[in-house]
Image: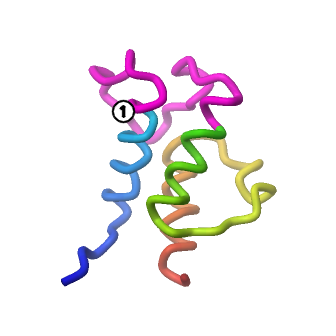
Amino acid sequence: MTTEITRDSIFNIIVQHTCEVIPELERHSFIETDRLADLGANSMDRADIVMMTLESLSLKIPLIELAKIKNIGEFTDLLYEKYQFS
């Protein structure tokens, strides 16, 4: 039995990996408009979060497609769209 991946579950995976990389955010109430940089994630942290999330979803996305992403909500939307067609 496979669990259906929803947009909300992708958002939660991003939040989970963000908290793994930046444990101080465990009590943060994440919202769609949160930007990882504004939450204290440096470029290496952001790269780790992206790679961990892609790995969790078994997705391969050209990193150039991520360049236009402004916040966690847009990242979620992109991953959900890619997951639907994978």
Which quadrant holds residue 78? bottom right
Residue 85 in the image: above or below residue 77: below
Quadrant, the C terminus: bottom right
Give the class, few, some or many, for how many residues have Cα within 10 Å of label 1's Cα (few <14, many ≥20): some
Residue 11, given in percent of the width and then of the height, sits at: 39, 51
Residue annotated with mark 1: 30
The structure residue drawn at horizontal position 60% and vertical position 50%, both measured from the top left corner, is 51
Q: Give whichever of 68, 58 is nearer the camera.
A: 58
Residue 82 in the image: above or below residue 74: below
| Left or right of 54, for residue 63 | right
Disc 1 residue type? Answer: Phe
| Left or right of 59, for residue 5 | left
Residue 19, given in percent of the width and then of the height, sits at: 39, 30
Residue 29 counted in the magenta span: yes
Residue 68 counted in the magenta span: no
Q: Which residues are magenta?
A: 19-46
Residue 11 in the image: above or below residue 35: below
Residue 12, given in percent of the width and then of the height, sits at: 33, 48
| Left or right of 58, for residue 63 | right
The structure residue drawn at horizontal position 57% and vertical position 69%, both measured from the top left corner, is 59
- Identify the element where label 1 is drawn: loop
Residue 16, given in percent of the width and then of the height, sits at: 36, 40
